[in-house]
Image (cartoon, rainbow, N blue to C red):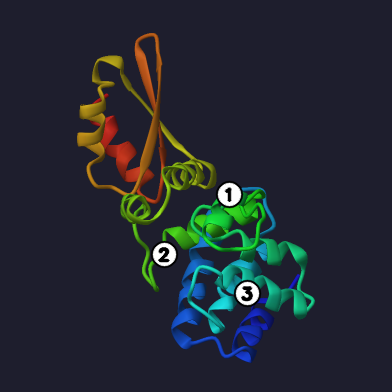
Amino acid sequence: MMKPEEALALLKKYGTSDSVIEHVKAVRDYAMELAAQHDCDRELVEAGALLHDIGRSRTHSIDHAIIGAAILRQEGVDERIIRITERHIGAGLTDEDAVNLGLPPGDYLPKTMEEKIVCQADNLMGSKDRISIHEAIATAEEKWSPDGVKRLIQLQFEVFKPVEVSINSRACDKKQIEEAIGSLDVLYKKKVEIGTCKILLYGSDAEKAAGNLKKMA
């Protein structure tokens, strides 16, 4: 597997700007935190995260992922890294999405856990600072299709390991739960059982949200 220093050297070979390199390093750091929650290839996650935006050395348009994949193929890079690069746009693109956006037809949806981790780490990263899932959703709602927004939310549930907390079923009201969670960086699912409500929390603030919910128990 390509080493981090080799990936960075490749970025510099193609004249990738310092700002993009700073961004991919930040995505790499977040992706590695997420990878630690899963049984996945962490070296692949690191290499894929560092190289996912190499196409921005040529363009900042939406086809930078396709151009980046072409660069990596020319360099003989591992096809698994290339797929991470191709499939990181938004929360992935269907064949129909690709055609509508003027991209080559193809299925650009992230499939493997490594692809999903890099994709979501990128979604939750600004130029160099992390953003919350709520900020990411708000941006997606302005720019993406409704299905794209749904995929973004689904990725959150897949790449974050849930923190589970049980509360009394009498407190299992959507308004009460959301008041307890507030603006914390987390999404949730709930499972209602006899006398108990289980809340599954997904996001960087899951532990904080769990603490708030336990006060309701």
**Can I make out residue 156 in this image?**
yes
Q: Name the residue furthest top.
A: 194
* Percent of width and height locating residue 189: 40, 31
Label tally: 3
Mark 3 lies on a secondary structure that is helix
Callout 1 amino acid: Glu
Q: Residue at x 69, y 57 (%)?
A: 41
Cα separation, mark 2 vs mark 1, equals: 26 Å
Using the image, tell me which numbered label, if any, was put on residue 96: 1
Coordinates of residue 147 in the picture (x, y in percent): 46, 42
Residue 42 in which image quadrant: bottom right
Q: Relative to 24, is 205 on the left or the right?
A: left
Image quarter (top left, top right, bottom left or bottom right) of the N terminus: bottom right
| Mark before the other along the chain sequence, 2 or 1 | 1
Which mark is drawn over residue 67? 3
Asked which secondary structure carries label 2, the reply is loop
